[in-house]
Amino acid sequence: MFCRSLFLAALLLASGCVSFVAPYDPTFDQSLNKLSEDTATFLAAASAGGPERRYGSQETVAYYAATYNVLDRLILRAKPLRGSKPCASSAGLKTFTELPYITTVLPEDYERLDCRESQLYSTRFYVDALNYAQKNDGVLNGSEIKYRGGTLQTAIMGTIQTLLENKPEA
């Protein structure tokens, strides 16, 4: 009985040291920081009445194409670790896909996503929401920039924070 208790105590202590995020990868850090910067620039230009405000402008098409491309590449890069450290919040992603404006498709095994991949999908959902708002009205208005753009930036920052949980000390 004592040995079993000792084993359980050791197991609990060891599990406290286990991270639920994949090892740090500088490619994610660089790509997500650039995405955050590009999103801030896009939203500021739209807010100032630039062509980014109009759906279908060259600048808008380029922003969405680049944003989806970055997120898709990072999701693909994260995929090999799927299932190794499933994230508890991944189960909640399914509710996003039920919204009529979400175009992102979750993988069938979405509940096995690690926290980094889960955050990337979540960020992609917020890009879908911004894209829909702009497409639906033909322009981004001030409240959409503030609300949709703000939640997108928050999602990007959350993804960066998740990534940094395993960044080695300099």
Image (cartoon, rainbow, N blue to C red):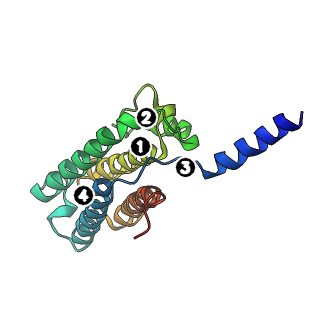
The residue positioned 23% from the left and 53% from the top of the image is 138
Q: Amino acid at mark 4?
A: Val
Q: Quadrant of the N terminus?
A: top right
Position above or below: 102 against 31: above
Q: Earlier in the sequence, mark 2 or mark 3?
A: 3
Q: Amino acid at mark 2?
A: Arg
Q: Relative to the observer, which residue lies in front, 47 or 27?
A: 27
Q: Which residue is mark 1?
A: 117
> In the image, which is nearer the foreground, mark 3 or mark 1?
3
Q: Earlier in the sequence, mark 4 or mark 1?
A: 1
Mark-to-mark CA distance, 3 and 1: 14 Å
Position above or below: 54 against 113: below
Q: Secondary structure at mark 2?
A: loop
Q: Earlier in the sequence, mark 2 or mark 4?
A: 2
Q: Which residue is mark 4?
A: 139
Q: Earlier in the sequence, mark 4 or mark 3?
A: 3
Q: Which residue is mark 2?
A: 82
Q: Which residue is mark 3?
A: 19
Q: Secondary structure at mark 1?
A: helix
